[in-house]
Image: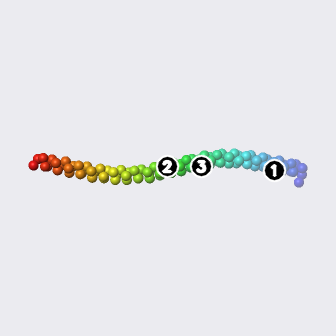
Amino acid sequence: MTNEEIQKTMEFIIKQQESFSESMERLRESHTKGEARLSRLEGAFVSLYKTVDDIARAQKELTQKMSELADSQAHTDQRVNVLIDVIEGRNGKSRG
């Protein structure tokens, strides 16, 4: 191999190394950006998980309150029916 061929081969290797180094730097930058995005997504996921948990608790509480309200409404209906019976009974006696 001549000195000129050796020189060309060395230049080729150096250019390849430079290209490789540039590609590695772009890859590092891309990786850093990807890690930052992943970190933000993890934060969003944690926030979403907490929100869903809060909604589930609120739904459970709402279901319990609705059941209590239905029981209370049934009790109120019974008391109103008794009152109606009393009023209708008095009206019937006063007419006769």
User: How far apart are the two marked residues, 1 and 2, measured between alpha carbons?
Assistant: 60 Å
Residue at 20% of width from left, 51% of height from top?
85
Disc 1 + disc 2, Cβ < 8 Å: no
User: How far apart are the two marked residues, 1 and 3, measured between alpha carbons?
Assistant: 42 Å
Sequence-earlier tag: 1 or 2: 1
Residue 8 image point, x, y percent: 84, 48
Numbered label attached to residue 42 = 3
Disc 2 + disc 3, Cβ < 8 Å: no
**3 or 53, which is in the foreground?**
53
Residue position for label 2: 54
Considering the image in quadrants, where does the N terminus appear?
Answer: bottom right
**48 or 38, which is in the foreground?**
48
User: How far apart are the two marked residues, 2 and 3, measured between alpha carbons?
Assistant: 18 Å
Identify the secondary structure beneath mark 1: helix
Disc 1 + disc 3, Cβ < 8 Å: no
Count of marks placed on residues? 3
Residue position for label 1: 13
Sequence-earlier tag: 1 or 3: 1
The reply, left or right, for residue 70 in relation to residue 15 is: left
**Viewer-side label of 1, 3:** 3
Q: What residue occupies the far left of the structure in this picture?
A: 96
Amino acid type shown at disc 2: Asp
Residue 11 image point, x, y percent: 83, 47
Residue at 23% of width from left, 49% of height from top?
83
- Around disc 3, counting alpha carbons within 10 Å, would you say few (fewer than 14), some (14 to 19), or many (20 or more)? few
Residue at 13% of width from left, 49% of height from top?
93
Amino acid type shown at disc 3: Glu
